[in-house]
Image (spheres, rainbow, N blue to C red):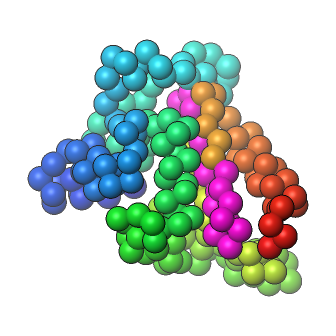
Amino acid sequence: MGLLGYALAVRAGKTYEELLIERICQPLGLNDTVITLSPDRRARLASGISLFGLPAMNWDLRTLAGAGGIRSTMRDMLVFARANLSPDGTPLAEAIRLTHEPRFTVAEHDDKNPTKIEIGLGWHITTTGDGRQVIWHNGMTGGYSSYVALVPDKQLGVVVLCNTASFEVDKFGNEVLKELLAIDPAGR
């Protein structure tokens, strides 16, 4: 993803951050999603904690920023999740739908594997035996972890942001998702 981001930026004649803001953040109203932190944003940034429980330096992935250099807020991530659940209400509807289309199959559903796992454009797509599709992505850098999962047929999304590098974030996000699916008030 870092190399792809770099190549797209070079092709556009802009920095990756300029391209990100112009093509994704501004159209979706993500006003606090950037790569370069202003003094105000730096002051609001939660300090990162490493896998070993020690203070972590922020990763500044200049050239490969597409592989984990984007910083955002919970508000912006929820707006992004909503846009992915209801793309028709956004100026990026067609592009968002294209990112959700499977491009590569990692594992087929069979007697031994209850889920089908595919890759879209920047998303993992898991389809359960009963046909439920979960579109998700996670990430971790030195001091931070994130998890986003979307269930389009339920119009349900989960976003977990953590200022600790931890593999537990995925587990937590999956458990929240399971609980929300179990208590679906719409009965869908």
Does any portion of residue 59 appear in the rendered image?
Answer: yes
Residue at 38% of width from left, 48% of height from top? 29
Q: Is residue 57 visible?
A: no
For the stretch drawn in magenta, the main secondary structure is strand
Q: Height in image: 121 above or below 164?
A: below
* 2 over 113 or under it: above or below: above
Q: Residue at the far bottom: name it.
A: 110
- Residue 38 sits in quarter: top left
In depth, the one of 29 and 68 nearer the eye is 29
The quadrant of the image that shows the C terminus is bottom right
In this image, 3 relative to 153: left or right? left
Percent x, y for residue 176? Answer: 79, 49
In the figure, 40 relative to 185: above or below? above
The percent coordinates of residue 92 (x first, y second) are: 37, 65
Q: Position of residue 65 (x, y in %)?
A: 35, 42
What range of the chain is rendered magenta? 140-158
